[in-house]
Image (spheres, rainbow, N blue to C red):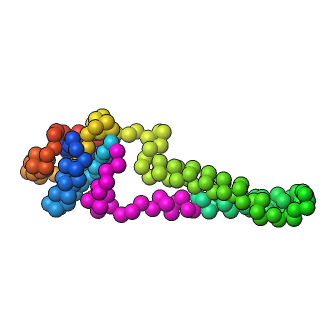
């Protein structure tokens, strides 16, 4: 692989120490590659300067597609393709369409958001996920920097940063 990169990362034992380290890295204008945590950490997104996710927009679009599919399909079946008067109801009985329309709205929205989330995060079944340290998914918090194009003085500055911010371990890995 031509696009291998060297990653210098520090492991932290506590999420509050990690958030403080992220804020300090931002203050020192370090370019953070990524932060890995075993569970969502409150206050980490603002500390990293991340904007709000737009996944809810995808959920709305897929939900609208599901509602239109259900309502349109039932309208076509009951009005155009197979019009039958059942119990005196008109062909186009909107209240009878509501439960199925709701169910397909929820189904399309949920499945669509999962597909979009997996696609954005690169979590496809065929993907080759590279893990920095197996303990990140268990009990460690990780702050990672891409050091591929850095010289030794910049790397030593980052190592000093990890030592000053309370990292329990400092490691380097090639991905």
Whole-percent x and y of residue 6? Answer: 23, 44
Q: Is residue 44 magenta?
A: yes
Q: Nearer the viewer, residue 159 or 6?
A: 159
Q: Is residue 94 visible?
A: yes
- The quarter of the rendered structure image containing the C terminus is top left
Whole-percent x and y of residue 93? Answer: 81, 64
Whole-percent x and y of residue 130? Answer: 34, 39
Q: Above or below — where is 140 with respect to 99?
A: above
In this rendering, position of residue 91 left or right of residue 118: right
- The quarter of the rendered structure image containing the N terminus is top left
The residue at the point 29 percent across, 55 percent down is 44
Could you say which quadrant of the image residue 39 lies in?
A: top left
The residue at the point 39 percent across, 62 percent down is 52
Q: Is residue 137 magenta?
A: no
Q: Look at the image and give the residue range highlighted in magenta.
A: 39-61
In this rendering, position of residue 66 left or right of residue 110: right
Could you say which quadrant of the image residue 138 lies in?
A: top left
The residue at the point 33 percent across, 38 percent down is 137
């Amino acid at each position: 692989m031509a696009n291998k990169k060297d990653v210098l990362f520090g492991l932290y034992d506590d999420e509050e120490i990690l958030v403080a380290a992220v804020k300090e890295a931002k203050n020192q204008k370090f370019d953070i590659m990524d932060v890995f945590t075993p569970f969502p950490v409150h206050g980490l997104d603002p500390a990293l300067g991340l904007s709000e996710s737009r996944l809810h927009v995808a959920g709305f679009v897929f939900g609208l597609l599901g509602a239109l599919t259900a309502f349109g399909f039932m309208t076509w079946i009951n009005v155009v393709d197979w019009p039958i008067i059942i119990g005196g109801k008109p062909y186009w009985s909107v209240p009878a369409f509501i439960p199925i329309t709701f169910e397909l709205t929820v189904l399309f929205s949920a499945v669509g958001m999962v597909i979009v989330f997996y696609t954005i995060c690169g979590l496809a079944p065929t993907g080759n996920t590279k893990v920095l340290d197996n303990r990140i998914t268990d009990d460690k918090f990780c702050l990672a920097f891409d050091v591929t194009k850095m010289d030794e003085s910049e790397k030593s500055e980052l190592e000093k940063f990890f030592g000053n911010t309370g990292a329990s371990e400092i490691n380097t890995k090639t991905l």
